[in-house]
Image (cartoon, rainbow, N blue to C red):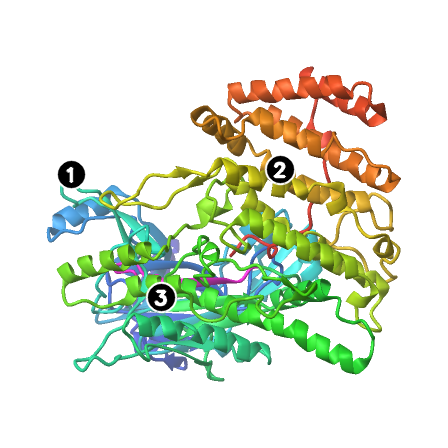
Amino acid sequence: MKRATQFCHLLFWLFLSFQCAAESVVDKTKGMQHHAGFVDFYWQESSGKIYIKVSDFEKDFLYVNYLQSGVGSNNIGLDRGQIGDTRVAHFKRLGNKVLMVQPNQSFRAHSDNALERQAVADGFAQSVLWGGEIKAETEGTVLLDITDFLLRDSQGIAGRLTQMKEGSFAVDAKRSAVYMNNTKNFPDNTEFEALITLQGKKPGKHIRSVAPTSDVISVRTHHSFVRLPEDVMPTRKFDPRSGGIPITFDDYAAPLGEPMKQQWVIRHRLEKDDKGHVKEPIVYYLDSGTPEPVRSALLDGARWWSEAFEYAGFEGGFEVKMLPADADPLDVRYNTIQWVHRSTRGWSYGASIVDPRSGEILKGHVTLGSLRVRQDMKIAQALLSPFKDGFESSDKMNQKMIQDMALARLRQLSAHEVGHTLGLIHNFYASSKDRASVMDYPHPLAQLKDGEIDLSDAYATGMGDWDKVSTDYLYRTFENAEAEQAGLEKILTDAAAEGHVFIADRDARMAGGSHPKAHLWDNGADAAEGLLDVLKVREVALSQFGLDSIKSGDTVASLESLLAPLYLFHRYQVEAAVKLIAGVDYRYAIKGEADVASQIVDADQQQAALEAVLKTIEAKTLALPEHLLNVLLPPTEGSYRDREHFKHRTGLNFDMLSAAEVAADHSLSLLLNPARINRLAEQHSRNDNIMSVKQLLAQLQKTTWGQKHKSSKQQLLQDSINWVTLQNTLQLASDKNLAAPVKAQVHSHLKSLSKQLKKSGAMGQLATDEINLYFKGEWKKEQTSTPKIPPGSPIGSIK
């Protein structure tokens, strides 16, 4: 009897399994809401589940994940609208499961031989992004429950928080759900959204500053399934001189003797009809949540690109509009410019969703941080100190002047970030050639006119000449492949003949960089002359800085928040000027061009640059006026100093020595960079007209330890500057990358300095003791660290 009962139970479960496996899609989806589109899906409200219908197996599509709503902290970097990953993927059926497979796009075989292509595909790992059991089936069309795929931590939020030491977080399924308000379907793209909640332990300071309950973070994630174009766009070869952004892969079908590494530029599809008219323009849409007057500034700046496209032969090929009220900024059909809010100022950036089969940009997505404009207003306010009479009417006029400069910067910023999404990278050479590109980082150009600071030309307007060249390279059409190759080369050679050079991020950003004209946040063809000009502007601005710098009714303590960007107004021009010292002028060259050799910067230019940089560490440069020191009051109750302020060692009161040490340390750390000093020694060995390391250190010593002042205040500042100079010299001497012959010269300088200072008072004795510690192997920089410099560039790591 017992066996009979067990047998009946077995038959019953087999029957149920057969019924489940045999259930049709129609039967399974009864009562569910059907959403037809690229990937048909069904919403079952009673269970909160999403089911998708799949029949096209092994057919590639694009899968993109985003953050719809952000965390709001620049340091953490999880912003509203942030694109996660863009992947080619396809569904693959194996038994009762369907897998979402990501083929490997980094290794390919461009060959007509299917077996050759398969051999490469089998040689490298793929990634299975998700897998699910078949819930129903009708004539080869299957139904899959993808709810768990949507409700996972697709943006890697938990991992990011762990990396940033912001706590240990994990998704709480009970507090996560499909967000149907923004889950939609269209013929060529399917959009899913989820509200996910992460529960955490030991949340860090940045999470605590933005989350209403610090151990609970709820955000919305977005997922797009996008149809890839049936007609693959023709590719265009990347050229390192072009300013384009490349996609790179290895082609294992490349003929022997030809490079396997292949690079194509990324660009939007832009075509003409038989009459030469644009078939469909590139259209960008501005976030409707952007307020005025910011809205108009962003529209104006983005529209500058129409001029570049007209130059490339596409009149009417680029437009900018407001995003329709019912449109989703993350919908792949819209190129969007989003106005994103964070708790502190941060980077803006432009990202693109790209078809890796061709380099076609399917969606441009710009993120503009809303607090940048307010920082620019602070800089203008500090430079101008415009509130001299305190009357309301004057305040309004001066506020407009400040706002006008900040809006001019926003126009440039809008154009810059849109440029990235059109396929262009930074060109940090452009500022040296009359602001030739919006793809450079611009510093406000403050000029002295009749002794007054003038900001009327703070930022350039419109497309630069280089922007037209790079757009021309990416987008101009040609009759055939042969004409294209010749035409593209002509675009670049003609540009070079006009003096245009392209130098990208790595060359410009290195602390020990050598290119004399590739800099961030600088102005002018000669960086050393530009530094002298900036120092003159800074001197005038500091002389008038004080109560006239703030509006009536502002707290006097708020002055300090304006001081840091003004006091350090020269910081980026220092970074530019110092590259002339041991500088090497070069460009990205192709064999067959003329004048491909690099050139060492002229000895006189190097000396002029050193003299300009040394001015930035003089006591008279770093001293603050007495009238100003008396009004730099401590923060009021309910306010505090943040990272935008100088760090103080004087309690609540302002610390003039700390500010001076920060500025001096900035210049000295750049000047005494090991790569720069190594280069200088090499250049002197090749050309004795160029200063030696010994001569540089001697001039540095004369500017610092060699200075004596009658004023006690000046001497106290000088002592602080001298100490920072010694610490940077010891840091240079101890650097493992310093070449042995160069280290010998630095050691000789230190021993000589020790002998000179041994009998020169308390500071001299302290310096001698420090040098002795170094030679005993007991010196550590951490024991005498200089306060950290306040941020100058936007805060965060994305740009």
Query: Count the marks: how many?
Result: 3
Q: Residue at (85%, 24%) from the top-left corner?
A: 761
**Contact flag, marks 2 and 3 (Cβ < 8 Å):** no
- Secondary structure under the numbered disc 1 in the rendered image: loop
Q: What element carries label 3?
A: helix
Circle 2: element type: helix
Does the magenta segment cover residue 689? no
Relative to 337, is 488 above or below?
above
Name the residue carrying label 1: 257
Which residue is at 43% across, 26% downward? 686
- Can you name the residue that lies furthest to the left here? 113
Q: How crowded is mark 3: few (under 14 residues within 10 Å), some or many (20 or more)?
A: many
Identify the amino acid type marked 3: Lys
Residue that numbered label 3 is attached to: 468
Please identify the residue farthest to the bottom as the structure is shown.
325
Q: Which of marks 1 and 3 is nearer the N terminus?
A: 1
Q: Above or below — where is 61 with respect to 398?
A: above
Q: Where is residue 512 in the image (x, y as percent from the top left)?
A: 52, 38
- 458 with respect to 135 (left or right): right
Q: Looking at the picture, how far across and down is residue 752, in whole percent?
A: 69, 18
Q: Distance between the residues labelled 2 and 1?
A: 46 Å
Residue 653 on image: x %, y %? 87, 50
User: What crowding class fits label 2: few (fewer than 14 Cα within 10 Å), some (14-19), or many (20 or more)?
Assistant: some
Q: What stretch is highlighted in magenta?
A: 347-359
Query: Residue 161: x percent and y percent?
Result: 59, 51
Q: In this view, does 582 lie above or below 86?
A: above
As shown in the figure, which amino acid type bears the numbered disc 1? Answer: Gly
Given this view, does label 2 or label 1 mark the residue nearer the observer?
2
Between 242 and 374, the one lying in front of the other is 242
Please state if 160 lies on the left or on the right of 234 as rendered: right
> Which residue is tagged 2?
669
Q: In which quarter of the image is residue 362?
A: bottom left
